[in-house]
Each structure stands twice: as structure tokens, then as C-alpha cells.
Image (spheres, rainbow, N blue to C red):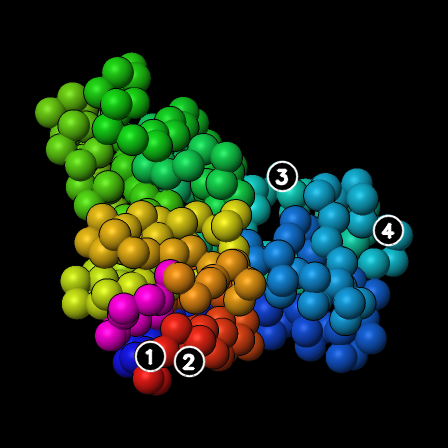
Amino acid sequence: MRIIIGEHAGFCFGVKRADETAFACAQEGLNAVTLGPLIHNPQEVERLRRAGIPSVESVDEVGDGQTMIIRSHGVAPSVYEQARARGLSVIDATCPHVAKIHDLVARYSEQGDAVIIVGEADHPEVRGIAGWAKGPVLMIPDVETAASIPVPDRALVIAQTTLREESFQRVLEVLEPRIRELTVRKTICGATEHRQEEARQLARTADVMVIVGGKNSSNTTKLAETCKGLCSRSYLAEVPEDLCGEMFRGAATVGVTAGASTPQWLLDQVVDRIRSLAEGVGSES
């Protein structure tokens, strides 16, 4: 069995930066917490907790004297204001690409544009971006919403950074005839696009696809959906034990990719599991 691992599988720049920042705090013995799970990978969040950096769900839960780490998804300005009001130390690990979107939203909304975010309304990145708008904000998850929701005459439209390009384009096709003055800014992360395209290429040729990552990860589940559409034997594995030998029976080629919040150590464990299972079903690796 041939195993092909995508070059773009695993941590993107922003997630890697946030992860390294948090573990550096742990190594320094800093009394710190992350505001929300640092990344959408339960295993890495647990590893960070064991290292001494747990997560909390609100600024109110940060203890006096603790340092608050802002995760790569970013937050609304109100969160910084809450932290300042309490005199908390803050380490900002917001992805630089997301921070640029914050600036973009603030600038256009100050000029009177409504802001339309194409993405999942309950995603922390989307909630954070929405908080930077000075006026109306619309969150559009799909084409159906784009066609039915009341829209303004003038708006800036952006995308959640992990959105699939085709999903963004489909929503734009619906919005453009409906909004008289629409400014489009492409904010899908380049790493997301590269990972998705690479996954498509792998899925077209592989007998089996394995997508490694947290089941609570938006970009990981989108990768799995993309692969499933091209390779019926596509499996999402959060941990190695999610895989069994029958998944690989008769497979000559296995493609492996991973979401942007999947650490390398977990990707390695899953690949080791695939090799072990391949031997069990009589394949050669």
C-alpha cells in the first residue's frame, strides 16, 4: 500500500504561531489561560492543559494576576476592553491574516458600509470579526440564506478564512445582483486554498482518503466533505483509533491530509496506524 501525505497537511501559520506561543508560556511557568480552546483539536488542547495552560470560556473566568492568551481566531474589541478594565495581562495570538480582516471591517464600516460575513455564525472567528463592525453586520452561511435575507444597498462582503472557495463564489453569485454597491474582498486564507486543492488532487487518485483532525474543526470537516465528494472511501480520524483495517482492504493508494488545527504528532500517529492496519489486511506499505 502506498501512503501519500499532503505537503500542506496540518498546522497553518496562524495556528502554529498560537500553539508555540502558548507552550512557550508553559515553559516559562507563566500563570496563563487561553480564552476559549486554543485550537479546534481536543488532543492538543488537552496536552496544553497538562502543560499548565488551561482554557476558560469568558474573561470573567480569568483569575486575578493571570495572563489571558487570545487564540488565533481573534476576538471582538469588547474583549480587549473587558481585559483592560480588569487590569489583565494579555498575549494576543490572533492570526495576522485574521487581524487584517478586523482592520478591513472596521475601515469599511466606518465609511458606512454594512458588513456581510460569509461563514458560520457561531464560529469564534466569525463572531470576532463581526465585533469590529461599526454598523450593520449580516452573517450568511449558505446560498439559501443569501437569497432570502434582506440585504442593504451598500456592503462589504468577506469570507471566513476557512471557507471553501466554491461556497464563497456561490454566495457571491446570489448577492451581486441583489446589492447595488457591493465591495468584495477575498479573505479565504491562502493556506486553506492550498490544502483544499491538494486534498482534491489526492482524493481523485487515491483508493482511500484519511482526513486527520478534530471533529469540532470547521476546516477539517470541510476537507472531509471535499474528499468525500471525490473519493467515497474517505474517513475523518480525530485519533488513530478511529481507523480500522476494513477501511483499507484492497486499497493500493491511501491519501492523507489534515486540518489546519491538527498537530504534527497526531498526524504521525495516524499515519503509523494506517501502516499497521495495512499489514493486518495483507497490503504492502
Kindly report the distance in space between the C-alpha atoms of the residues bearing marks 3 and 1: 56 Å
Q: Which residues are magenta?
A: 247-256
Quadrant of the frame with the N terminus? bottom left
**Residue 206 shows up from this direction:** yes
Whether the residues at callouts 2 and 1 have beta carbons within 8 Å, the answer is yes
Q: Is residue 226 above or below residue 119?
A: below
Q: Secondary structure at mark 3?
A: helix
Where is mark 2, residue-wise?
279
Residue 254 is covered by the magenta coloring: yes
Amino acid type at mark 2: Glu
Crowd around label 1: few <14 · some 14–19 · many ≥20 (10 Å): some
Where is mark 1, residue-wise?
283
Kindly report the distance in space between the C-alpha atoms of the residues bearing marks 4 and 3: 18 Å
Amino acid type at mark 4: Gly
**Residue 252 coordinates in the image, percent (x, y):** 24, 74
Sequence-earlier tag: 3 or 1 = 3
Where is mark 3, residue-wise?
78
**Residue 162 shows up from this direction:** no
**Residue 12 coordinates in the image, percent (x, y):** 42, 68
Identify the residue at horizontal 28%, vertical 36% (top origin). 156
